[in-house]
Amino acid sequence: MLNRLMQEHNHLRRVLNLLEQYCIDLCRDAETEPSIIMSIVVYTQEHPEKVHHPLEDAAFSRLLHYDNESRPMIQALMRDHTELEKITRSLRDTLETFVSLKTYNKKQLIMELMTFLSRQRQHLLTEEARVYPLLRQHLSDEDWREIGDSVQEADDPVFGSREKAEYQLLFERLEQ
């Protein structure tokens, strides 16, 4: 399960790297692909909320049974999942206006993208540097089995079987 969490982080980093390039393109007045930017934001909102964060939250909650010292940090990361959802929702709203009306406040969009990117990256780094080692140290195979049984499994719509056609173009851009 921990390997799955790290693999999902790797996938998210690839998507964030592409989004960062699009943000740079916006700053440079270069051509962008609003539909790909929207796909990235939708992916980072929907997949983690359905699959990744519930698994992390279950693991983090279980960790609290073994390591009370890390309680403030773990609780902050769990709250951060909610805060990241709000940031992502706001960015998605801005992008929906951009895509549908073909008009937007460029400065606002760039600022929202920068906030989104920096918060996502900081969150991933904190989890991997500070919490994942604690999960590895404290949780047993039995803990991971119980955690796995308590959360939903779902195929990654970008890096999995790609059954959802809406992510095909995003996957192709990632492969370029």
Image: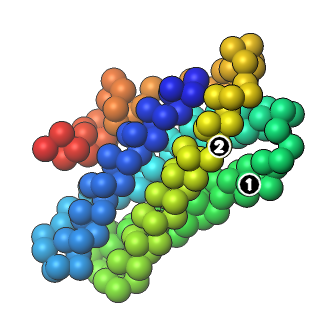
Picture residue at 51% right of the left edge, 64% below the top: 119
Q: Find residue 156 and report its image quarter.
A: top left
Between 143 and 23, which is closer to the camera in this rendering? Answer: 143
Tell me whether the residue at label 2 lies in contact with that at label 1, contact meaning CB atoms closer than 8 angstroms.
yes
Between 157 and 72, which is closer to the camera in this rendering? Answer: 72
Picture residue at 64% right of the left edge, 63% below the top: 83
Question: With respect to residue 160, does 16 lie above or below?
Answer: below
Is residue 68 visible in this depiction of the protein?
Answer: yes
Picture residue at 58% right of the left edge, 60% below the top: 84
- In the picture provided, is 115 more to the left or to the right than 60? left
Amino acid type assigned to the residue bearing label 2 in the image:
Val
* Residue 59 % position (x, y): 71, 33
Question: With respect to residue 89, does 134 lie above or below?
Answer: above
Amino acid type assigned to the residue bearing label 1 in the image:
Met
- In the picture provided, is 107 more to the left or to the right than 81? left
Q: Find residue 149 and report its image quarter.
A: top right
Q: Secondary structure at mark 1?
A: helix
Q: Which residue is mark 1?
A: 73
- In the picture provided, is 145 more to the left or to the right than 33? right
* Residue 44 % position (x, y): 46, 50
Question: With respect to residue 104, does 15 lie above or below?
Answer: above
Q: Which residue is mark 2?
A: 131
- In the picture provided, is 48 more to the left or to the right than 117? right
Mark positioned earlier in the residue sequence (2 or 1) = 1
Question: With respect to residue 171, does 44 lie above or below?
Answer: below
Is residue 97 visible in this depiction of the protein?
Answer: no
* Residue 152 % position (x, y): 62, 26
Q: CA distance from mark 2 to mark 1?
A: 8 Å
Q: How is the image coloured?
A: rainbow
